[in-house]
Image: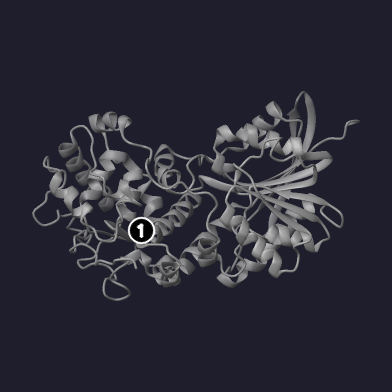
Amino acid sequence: MVQTTKPLSAVVLGRVESNKKAHIPALSGVSVGTKNRKGVAAQVKNKGHIDPTTWPNLVREPSAPMMGARASAVHDRLEEFLDSVDISVPDEPIGIGDIDPEPPIAYNPEAVFSSEPMRMSVYDPNVMNRMVDSGFLGLGEGYVAGEWDAIPLADVLATLLDHDIEAGWGKMLSRWSRNKVTGVPRAGELPLELIELCTGPSKTWGSPLFATSSRTSVTETLNWKNKNTIVDVTRYESPQSVSYDDIESAQYRRVNQMLDECRVGPGSRVLEFPASSATLAVTAARRGATVDVLTSDPVYAEDIRRIVREEKLAGAVHVETISGPIPSPRQWSGVYDAIMSVERMETMGVGGLRPFLRAIGRMLSSGGRACIQSVINTGLSENSIQALGIMRGYVWPALEYPTVENIRDALMRYTDLVERAEVHCGDHLRVTLPLWRREFAINRDAAAAAGFDRVYRRLWFYVLALQEALFMRGELDVAQFVLLKPKKSE
């Protein structure tokens, strides 16, 4: 059973008024950035809801050169910034006692779509020390530890990412800040139980494609290995009037579009790797294809097999476990007419593009097609890259969103594949993320029963909000890349 504790005694930002600036008072008896950091660290280590074995970095005492003076400066700069952007501030903690006093304010499902002005509460000023120690990674860890909250969380994060945590000599010293997390469990695939708590029975991860969206298409001529090649580029606009109930059909629309791009039909040999969910494999099998699904996670493999058996498609879909996300020729030597991947390429980092795309080229038959869906970088700021450290540290260790140029360059340098089409639908994931986050908040009791402790729940809530914030800022997009392996005569 997860031990629960109420948030630390109310330490909130004072209300922003025309004659009063935002104020972050210190926790009783402990000043922010005190040189005697053990007093602040003790507050962290004694939080009963954090298992120090599972989450060692959350109970670790923040440490950095000149911590005391820098944390005080971080505190003052944050007060000034909040005042300048009108992030409002209650005189009393937001929502505590109204919904659930254990998960603080932003965990209220209704707060996900709050139309009220942005608000923020700080429960423990140790988050200032964390920010000195590790910048926006520290801010995220402070949220996960329950040291602060905000409504609406994604909007506040999108605004905070414009704020430089430190300036002057403090910013110079921050170059040596901790920007990695060590000593925590490394995730394989996302657990299907976690996915279901967000997505519902479809258990389908990745950007959907809603029907209520216009689109534009243009052709782009690329110099592909000294030859001109035409790429059809389609951009879907933001969908209209989307609800949670629309997501499942939108997922099937996206899956079927990917299968159409690869011309999957009766007799097609299809590979999905790394596995995203059972939906793509099941849908392809219903078209008459035979499907192989590769994953490095034995538990995930068994979950997908179970779904396939329930759909009575075990003869058409085969799920295999490999030792890593990318199979070597010895591990897997199959040849396929179509290869699919859904938002997994980015979890391997830009350095993983070469082996990933070469593996696709090796396993694709002559004339075969691949469709790779990925979240892509359209201009991540330095602060945003630092903020993504929370995802690299606790979810996907190698996460690095590639640019379109990164992907095209790797294709031309390391493969014989040719890009034929590109489909952009980032606004569809942008409107989906808050719907998933709200559903996850509604299902928090079920998440606890499934074994996800309070820290994990807050981590996942924060990860979804951070991704939403980056889409709101226009720094991320979603793209499908349709690739062709030319026939020998071409």
Residue toward you, 129 or 171: 129
Q: Is residue 419 visible?
A: no
Describe residue 34's horizontal placement relative to residue 6 as left or right. Answer: left
Q: Quadrant of the N terminus?
A: bottom left
Q: Position of residue 432 (x, y in %)?
A: 55, 61
Q: Position of residue 394 (x, y in %)?
A: 42, 48
Q: Which residue matches tag 1?
A: 455
Describe residue 404's horizontal placement relative to residue 412 as left or right. Answer: left
Q: Residue furthest bottom?
A: 98
Q: Is residue 158 visible?
A: yes
- Residue 421's place in the image compared with 277, above or below, is above
Q: Residue at x 40, y 46 (%)?
A: 390
Q: Residue furthest top?
A: 226
- Residue 381's place in the image compared with 117, above or below, is above
- Residue 128's place in the image compared with 122, above or below, is above
Q: Residue furthest right?
A: 489
Q: Position of residue 428 (x, y in %)?
A: 59, 58
- Residue 330's place in the image compared with 32, above or below, is above
Q: Quadrant of the C terminus?
A: top right
Residue toward you, 78 or 38: 38
Residue toward you, 210 or 395: 395
Describe residue 218's horizontal placement relative to residue 7 as left or right. Answer: right
Q: Residue at x 55, y 52 (%)?
A: 189
Q: Residue at x 60, y 65 (%)?
A: 240
Q: Position of residue 396 (x, y in %)?
A: 49, 45
Helix, strand or loop under label 1? helix
What amino acid is labelled 1 in the image?
Answer: Val
Q: Dot 1: within a 10 Å radius of its alpha carbon, few (fewer than 14), some, or many (20 or more) residues?
A: many
